Image (cartoon, rainbow, N blue to C red):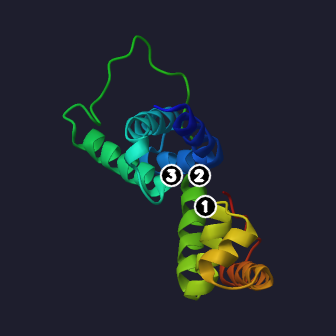
Amino acid sequence: MHPDQQRDFADFVAARSDSLIRLAYVLTNDQHAAEDLLQSALAKTAGRWRRIRGNPEMYVRRVMYHEQVDRWRSPGWGRERVMDAVPERASGDRTAEVDNRITLDQALRALPVRKRAVLVLRYYEDLPESEVAKIMGCSVGTVRSQTHQAIARLRELVGEPVTLEA
């Protein structure tokens, strides 16, 4: 790879790794597997970097998705693994956590599309207000007011304080 291309790739990785690792975690539901998935996707992307045109992040996302689908399809995926000792960690009752997620999911679905989109872009994708404004084709002030209104509506629908996690 040419030094300019190496620098471009390194800049891309530095700028987009946070977003990409979140996607990898959503795909794998395991931090270590997410790191492995992202590393594998970035290695494949590096090999094709000079041929990638347009949006390299979309290319990496597509590679990650296909890699994870291949892992799901592999014969060993999901099988039990033999361990020397049983882990001492007891699993607690997570019913309340599941109920909260279901309630929040239902409340999100009840929001108008633009308000839901603002929350997803701001809190799930962790994009700055200016980027959300560009994506949605509106002003930063509109993004702020839509975010405020959406959170207020979520609080009404849920009936308790809403905490959004990135």
Q: Quadrant of the C terminus?
A: bottom right
In the picture as drawn, the residue positioned furthest to the bottom comes out as: 112
Could you tell me residue 68's position as x and y percent? Answer: 34, 44
Quadrant of the rendered structure where residue 8 is? Answer: top right
Residue type pointed to by label 3: Leu
Q: Which residue is mark 1?
A: 125
Return the mark for residue 63: none
Q: Identify the residue shown where x is 55% and y is 31%.
A: 3
Label 3: element kind: helix
Dot 2 crowding, Cα within 10 Å, few <14, some 14–19, many 20+: some
Q: Is residue 17 left or right of residue 154?
A: left
Label 2: element kind: helix
Answer whether labels 1 and 3 touch (C-beta < 8 Å).
no
Answer whether labels 3 and 2 touch (C-beta < 8 Å).
yes
Q: Identify the residue shown where x is 44% and y is 49%.
A: 60
In the picture as drawn, the residue positioned furthest to the top comes out as: 84
Residue type pointed to by label 2: Ser
Residue type pointed to by label 1: Glu
Answer whether labels 1 and 2 touch (C-beta < 8 Å).
yes
Q: Is residue 54 left or right of residue 93?
A: left
Q: Is residue 95 left or right of residue 46?
A: right
Mark toward the start of the polypeptide (1 vs 2): 2
Q: Is residue 152 left or right of residue 118?
A: right
Return the mark for residue 19: 2
Could you tell me residue 124's position as x and y percent? Answer: 61, 62
Q: Which residue is mark 3?
A: 23
Q: Identify the residue shown where x is 62% and y is 69%.
A: 121
Label 1: element kind: loop
CA gap, disc 1 and disc 2 = 7 Å
